[in-house]
């Protein structure tokens, strides 16, 4: 089946630091999304990025479909950025296959 | 609020009871998905509807699970004879087009005692 691997599994940062989260995948990309899951379990859409680069404020993402990876950049991190970040791939199948997530903790 | 909504948000039940969850997708979205998430894991796909047609089911969807989308709008997920292993967050998502961006509801957290 489709494999989606995220790294690192855990990341602890001091407020103000920058970070890069990585997502490797095994299938061709029709859809790739990055989510932030808040403490109540809500998945918040960050990026829909099957290819290319997008930026939204302090967050940006890049997907290189030919090399089967995507990166999420967080700059000037804030405590409110804490939570679990998921990468999810919609390949040849209709549904999304999620990675196991990166647990980010930003310390004040 | 024009996002995906789910009801109830929390459900506590005893083993062996039946439960039903509801999902209302974004109004113009004709594609609807159910996922299940257990603690410490990413969500896993359960089933997919295009309009009222259930087009795909995961092998995670045992015969105790049934999903419907009778008029191509809201959907229900029923679990019969619940087991403790069914305890999880049940998430619903919708999208406008195949391969398009999926938007998730707040989930229903099920606890089976």
Image (tube, rainbow, N blue to C red):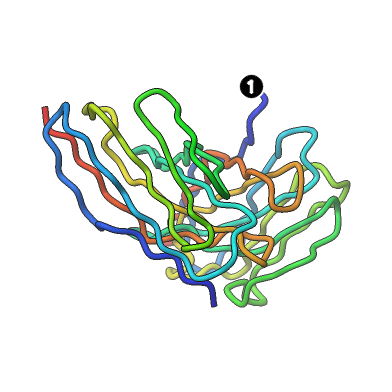
The vertical placement of B63 against B72, above or below, is below
The vertical placement of B97 against B38, above or below, is above
The vertical placement of A33 against A106, above or below, is below
Q: Residue at x 53, y 62 (%)?
A: A66
Specify whether B112 is left or right of A73.
Answer: right
Specify whether B71 is left or right of A105.
Answer: right
Screen quadrant of the C terminus of chain B:
bottom left
| Closer-to-camera residue (A65/B8) | A65
Residue A67, horizontal then vertical, whole percent? 47, 63
The crowding category of the residue bearing disc 1, from other C-alpha atoms within 10 Å (few below 14, some 14 to 19, many at least 20), is few
Task: Give the chain of mark 1.
Answer: B
Q: Residue at x 72, y 60 (%)?
A: B67
Residue A57, horizontal then vertical, whole percent? 40, 23
Q: Residue at x 54, y 78 (%)?
A: A1
The residue that label 1 is drawn on is: B1
Specify whether A89 is left or right of B74.
Answer: left
Q: Which element is circle 1 on? A: loop
Screen quadrant of the N terminus of chain B:
top right
The vertical placement of A96 against A51, above or below, is below
Residue A91, horizontal then vertical, whole percent? 61, 63
| Closer-to-camera residue (B7/A65) | A65
């Amino acid at each position: 089946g489709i494999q989606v691997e995220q790294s690192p599994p855990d990341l602890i940062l001091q407020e103000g630091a920058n970070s890069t989260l990585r997502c490797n995948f095994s299938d061709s990309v029709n859809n790739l999304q990055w989510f932030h899951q808040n403490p109540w379990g809500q998945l918040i859409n960050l990026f829909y990025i099957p290819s290319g680069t997008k930026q939204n404020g302090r967050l940006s993402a890049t997907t290189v479909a030919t090399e089967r990876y995507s990166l999420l950049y967080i700059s000037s991190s804030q405590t409110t950025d804490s939570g679990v970040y998921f990468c999810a791939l919609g390949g040849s199948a209709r549904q999304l296959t999620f990675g196991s997530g990166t647990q980010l903790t930003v310390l004040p | 609020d024009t996002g995906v909504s789910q009801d109830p948000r929390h459900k506590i039940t005893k083993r062996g009871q039946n439960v039903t969850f509801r999902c209302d997708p974004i109004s113009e979205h004709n594609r609807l998905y159910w996922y299940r998430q257990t603690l410490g894991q990413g969500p896993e796909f359960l089933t997919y509807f295009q309009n009222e047609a259930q087009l795909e089911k995961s092998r995670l969807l045992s015969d105790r699970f049934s999903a419907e989308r009778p008029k191509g709008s809201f959907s229900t997920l029923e679990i019969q004879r619940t087991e403790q292993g069914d305890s999880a967050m049940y998430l619903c998502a919708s999208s406008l087009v195949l391969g398009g961006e999926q938007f998730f509801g707040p989930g229903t957290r099920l606890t089976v005692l």
